[in-house]
Image (cartoon, rainbow, N blue to C red):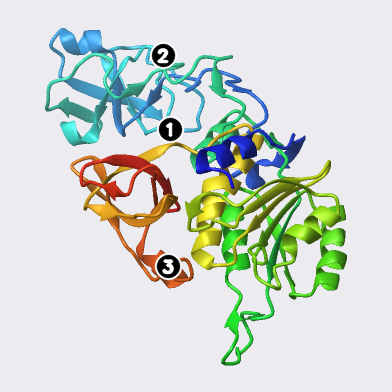
Amino acid sequence: MVSVAEAKRIILEHLFNPSVEFVPLTSAHGRILAEEIAADRDLPPFHRATMDGIAIAFDQYQTGQHRFAIGGVQAAGQPKQQLTDSAFCFEIMTGAPLPDGADTVIPYEHLSINEKLVTVLEAVSKGQNIHRQGSDAQKGALLLSKGFRISPAEVALLASVGKTTVAVYKNPTAAIVSTGDELVDVGETPLPHQIRKSNSYALAAALAETGCNARVFHLADDKTELEEKIKSLLENYELIILSGGVSKGKFDFVPKVLESLGVKKIFHQVSQRPGKPMWFGQSPRNTVFALPGNPVSTFMCFHRYVKPWLLKSLRTEVLKESAVLATDFSFPPKLTYFLQVKIKNESGQLMAYPAAGGGSGDFANLKDVDGFLELPLDRSEFNTGETFPLISFR
């Protein structure tokens, strides 16, 4: 048995080496950037108005002129015009280029307009309401580095520099395998001694949040079937996540089957609750996480171990979080305990409220919590106000 810290260290020492692929910009959301992105021109590329109103030469206003005749209209998307006579102004729209000869924009709300004559009603400062050329980034400036996870905000940035395709790290081909004769599919009506599958769907959804899609399989508690099907999966998928069949029960065949098929066991069992029977191994082609079948155990192990492994392999990492224990809590066994908690932001501090639930099989309780607070194994009493690592899944 290994500790949680040892399990984490070992797993992160056994990363996979992703290749790079190019995807359309429309498919880049959620992926991990594998190239550096630089500005192909100044951002913004011209002095642009940030409000609808008029563009003037401030020096003319400063001489005491507060009435301007409208000399034209500068619309967004039109070539830049020129204010040749500073006694005049241009009407200007948000996003339009600032006409040459003008240096200040006054919003309509601060004006009175009578036909073609504009009166300025409020004080004006030079250069107001202008987004200046290159103020966001100058041409050639680094905008995004490798390892950046692409959110909708980065999609917009990539579009602004003309990236129709984007280099991203390629996710491993992934298979999720649930095991157990007690499980039936979602659309079936379970018999009194059966339950519907849930772990495989939860794992697939959690993987998809990282940008990695997986195929879902189910195998019976039959050693021969497990050997045949897992052999095929090992030939076709680089990442395999199993749920169930890893403990010490009579029908827990998964560890021996994996080793018989050439997957080297790196560790089996972690001094933690939930998730103690977790198994981890690798072959030259595959990385295999065999997680306990209880839903909360499966869910916790994915977020504590599988997700960090995947993201670090893809040249990025899970952000570290912590939260303050909001009530006293005790856990006597010498195991690292992953406490289900509800998180509340109180005066800028994340407070963790325990939600005990019904144990590792109580997946319904997960709807009421936001993550797991990691309580160390060298203690049994945990006090209000203490800060501990937080593994959040919302």
The image shows residue 231 at horizontal and vertical percentages of 86, 59
Determine crowd level at label 2: few under 14, some 14-19, many 20+ residues with C-alpha closer than 10 A.
some
The image shows residue 370 at horizontal and vertical percentages of 38, 56
State the residue at coordinates (80%, 61%): 257
Out of 49 and 292, give the one closest to the viewer: 292
Question: What residue is shown with label 1?
Answer: 75
Quadrant of residue 127 within the rendered picture: top left
Task: Using the image, tell me which numbered label, if any, was put on residue 335.
Answer: none
The image shows residue 328 at horizontal and vertical percentages of 22, 52
Question: What residue is shown with label 3?
Answer: 359
Q: Gap between marks 2 and 1, in whole Å? A: 14 Å
Residue type pointed to by label 2: Asp
Q: Gap between marks 2 and 3, in whole Å? A: 70 Å
Counting residues from the start of the chain, the first of labels 1 and 3 encountered is: 1
Tell me whether the residue at label 2 lies in contact with that at label 3, contact meaning CB atoms closer than 8 angstroms.
Answer: no
Residue type pointed to by label 1: Ala
Quadrant of residue 16 within the rendered picture: top right
Give the number of the mark in front: 1 or 3.
3
The mark tally for this picture is: 3
Counting residues from the start of the chain, the first of labels 2 and 3 encountered is: 2
Counting residues from the start of the chain, the first of labels 2 and 1 encountered is: 1
Residue type pointed to by label 3: Gly
